Amino acid sequence: MYRYVSPVELKELVRAGGEGRSMRSSADFVEWASALTLDELAEPFTFVVDAAGVLRLAPRRSEHVVCAGGEEVLSAGEMSFREESERWAVEEVRNQSTGYCPDVISWPAVAEALNRIGIHHSSGFTHEVVFRRCGSCRELNIVWEEDFVCVFCGEDLSREWNVAKLDR
């Protein structure tokens, strides 16, 4: 489980009933997707997989913490879809959420949520984002090309996910 680790001001945006749309079945997804315009479908969506393993979707510029209703999640990021041969599939999916900073090992929760609603998907994130918190300056880092060095202070970063462990 991943808890929200970013600015408190964004968590204050959470309102009862304002969370992302829950996708509990294929019918839920089809109903949701068929109400979208082509322009809306062209952009990725904010997603979380909630504690119950349910995929929740919201417009891309939505905060993950709002999509999750302020709760802990099994994974979070961005996801885009395409329809192929009258079937829905994930086009791209990434764990890009600076609110929750989920580790790449959160993929099985995403796959299980997609399987439950019958959405075809890849075997993993199409783009993996590696988050680490610096043990020295406590700043959040995104690791690029296996360079585990803090961009803020130059200290070595943990090879293991540590974002919430070293939270401010």
Image (cartoon, rainbow, N blue to C red):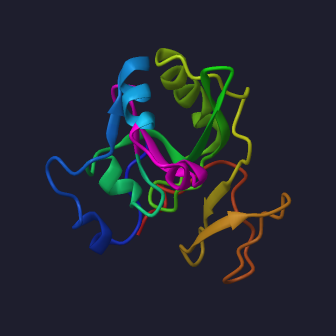
- The foreground one among 78 and 51 is 78
- Where residue 148 sits, quadrant-wise, is bottom right
The answer to whether residue 45 is magenta is: yes
Please tell me which residue is depicted at 33% across the width and 26% down the height of the picture: 52
The quarter of the picture where the C terminus appears is bottom left
Residue 104 image offset from top left, x and y in percent: 65, 42
- The foreground one among 108 and 18 is 18
Please tell me which residue is depicted at 43% across the width and 42% down the height of the picture: 48
Residue range corresponding to the magenta coloring: 35-57
Residue 146, placed above or below residue 79? below
Q: How many numbered dots are placed on residues in this image?
A: 0
Residue 60 image offset from top left, x and y in percent: 48, 58
Residue 133, placed above or below residue 125? below
Q: Is 166 placed left or right of 86 in the picture?
A: left
Residue 25 visible: no
- The foreground one among 160 and 47 is 47
Residue 73, placed above or below residue 58? above
The answer to whether residue 82 is magenta is: no
Residue 42 image offset from top left, x and y in percent: 60, 52
Please tell me which residue is depicted at 71% across the width and 48% down the height of the picture: 128
Residue 59, placed above or below residue 75? below
Residue 36 visible: yes
Q: Is 23 placed left or right of 152 in the picture?
A: left
Q: Is 63 placed left or right of 37 in the picture?
A: left
Please tell me which residue is depicted at 71% across the width and 74% down the height of the picture: 150
Residue 56 image offset from top left, x and y in percent: 38, 38
Q: In the displayed image of the protein, which residue is found farthest to the bottom?
A: 153
The quarter of the picture where the N terminus appears is top left
- The foreground one among 160 and 32 is 32
